[in-house]
Image (spheres, grey):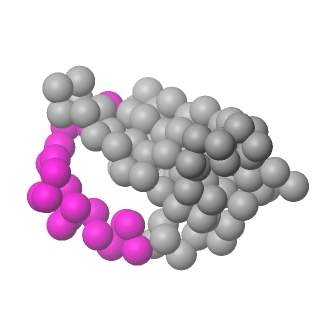
Amino acid sequence: MAMTVLQFDFPYAGPWGAEMAQRLEGLAQDIAAEQGLLWKIWIENQAEGTAGGIYLFADEAAAERYRAKHSERLAARGVRDIAVRAFNINAPLSSITRAPF
């Protein structure tokens, strides 16, 4: 099975930066324990009022399980307009350009 990338982004009003890191540390610990997750990069754009993440999963099944779980979690917190995209990885080309796997 091929590794899968998920990209989540959604409207976000803050907090940002260090305060965001402090407030969401528990969530980060929960996400880190997700089966099949290899890594996540947290993204934020205060100027546009958006946040989200780029996730690398070991396989498509793990990515799809997480997509459903996290979409439900965000919706339960009142987050709307959640954009989620899934991508397969071209490993040979990604290796040439120093992808971290």
- Residue 27 on image: x %, y %: 37, 66
- Quick check: 81 above or below 92? above
- Quick check: 16 above or below 101? above
Query: What quarter of the picture does the C terminus occupy?
Result: bottom right
Specify the quadrant of the image occupied by residue 46.
top left
- Per the rendered image, the range of residues in magenta is 11-29
Predominant secondary structure, magenta span: helix
Is 50 on the left or on the right of 72, as rendered?
left
The one of 91 and 81 positioned closer to us in this rendering: 91
Of all residues, the one furthest to the top in this rendering is 48
The one of 71 and 2 positioned closer to us in this rendering: 2
- Residue 51 on image: x %, y %: 32, 39
Is 87 on the left or on the right of 21, as rendered?
right
- Residue 76 on image: x %, y %: 43, 50
Based on the picture, tell me whether residue 24 belongs to the magenta stretch: yes
Is 10 on the left or on the right of 40, as rendered?
left
Residue drawn at the location 49% of the way across and 45% of the way down: 54
Residue drawn at the location 49% of the way across and 39% of the way down: 8
Residue drawn at the location 58% of the way across and 49% of the way down: 99
Of all residues, the one furthest to the right in this rendering is 1
Is 35 on the left or on the right of 55, as rendered?
right
Look at the image and tell me whether residue 65 can be seen: no
Look at the image and tell me whether residue 63 can be seen: yes
